[in-house]
Amino acid sequence: MADYEKRLDFLTPEQHDQLLFCRIKDGQINTFLDMVAKGYGLTPFILNALIDFGYEKVIQKAIQSSVRLANDCYPFLCFYWGKKKTEFFFVEQKYYNYIKENFHVKTLVEYQLWDILAQKEKFYILAENGQFDILAKYKKYQLLVKYGQLDYACHKGLYQFLAFTKAGMERLIQLKKWKEVFEGTSFTAFNGFSVSDILEILYDNGMQELLFAKCCNDFLLDYKKYTKPYVANKKWGTLAFFGFYDEIDWEDYLGQVIESKKEDVYKEAVEAKNWAFLAKHQQHKLLFKTGQFKWWWKSFR
């Protein structure tokens, strides 16, 4: 059969029509049906010939037998049979390729052809019709959450998608899923929480280490004046940038940086008025320039 169909590929659609038309004209309907089943293309021209020669009752069997049904047979049948009868017939016969190509979205919903809607990427339509298993199958988790399927998302461990909505954020806070709550800072346009709201919630729930790991320096240092993790992790440069000079181990800070950056540490020590440190490291020029003559003198010892 495969070789037979490949041989038919060498014929033009017009030649298919001509050969099938001859069989209809000669009343050789069984031969005609056999040819259609073996790969001769079925077109509106041939369907019209069946009607004209009084074989309209053969149309349904011809379509069912056909392995090469032209796509434009669908609108032809809609005109001849009527749209509803044609739609029902195609659904009953499971002609999904033709259905996908020709059916309107509303018709696909009417016949509950959810998989075809998914293939056509009509995911919002699926959500509106409660087809959440289909959405999950296609990994449209964000839509699941948007349409209130929070329990489903939690059951599947899809907590990161809850951050897209206000209700989802509230559930994350309730469940103390703090990493996912922080991810909500990227979706404030959708979830109704401001960045400052989220950071305050995390801080109030003891998530300072998480905020530190996420480099929320402005919030922790400039706003909250919270230096503990920066001292513990020897983030001297960050502490210096925010003016927490008293928290800095200056000797350790100097040892952290490469030779070409040591001058920057000395300049920061000037801002910190750490004259003893500058004198110890013989920063004569900086001490003299800032009028610290006593320490300038000591820097030579």
Image (tube, rainbow, N blue to C red):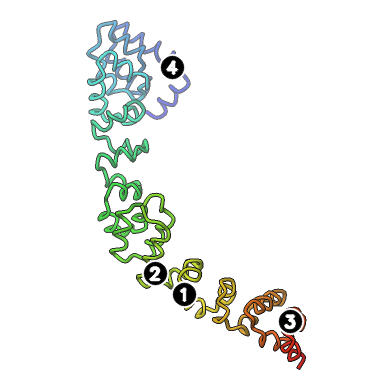
Q: Residues within 10 Å of mark 3 (few under 14, many from 20)?
A: few
The alpha-carbon separation of the residues under discs 1 and 4 comes to: 79 Å
The alpha-carbon separation of the residues under discs 3 and 2 comes to: 43 Å
The quadrant in which the C terminus is found is bottom right
Q: Residues within 10 Å of mark 1 (few under 14, many from 20)?
A: some
Q: Secondary structure at mark 2?
A: helix
The alpha-carbon separation of the residues under discs 4 and 2 comes to: 72 Å
Q: Earlier in the sequence, mark 3 or mark 1?
A: 1
The part of the image, by quadrant, that contains residue 126 is top left
The part of the image, by quadrant, that contains residue 274 is bottom right
Residues 118 and 185: in front is: 185
| Three-letter code for the amino acid on which mark 3 is drawn | Gly
The residue that disc 2 covers is: 203
The alpha-carbon separation of the residues under discs 1 and 2 comes to: 10 Å
Residue name at image x 32 percent, y 27 percent? 104
The disc label shown at residue 24, or none? none
| Three-letter code for the amino acid on which mark 4 is drawn | Pro
The residue that disc 4 covers is: 13
The residue that disc 3 covers is: 291
Q: Earlier in the sequence, mark 3 or mark 4?
A: 4
Give percent across and percent down for residue 70: 37, 21
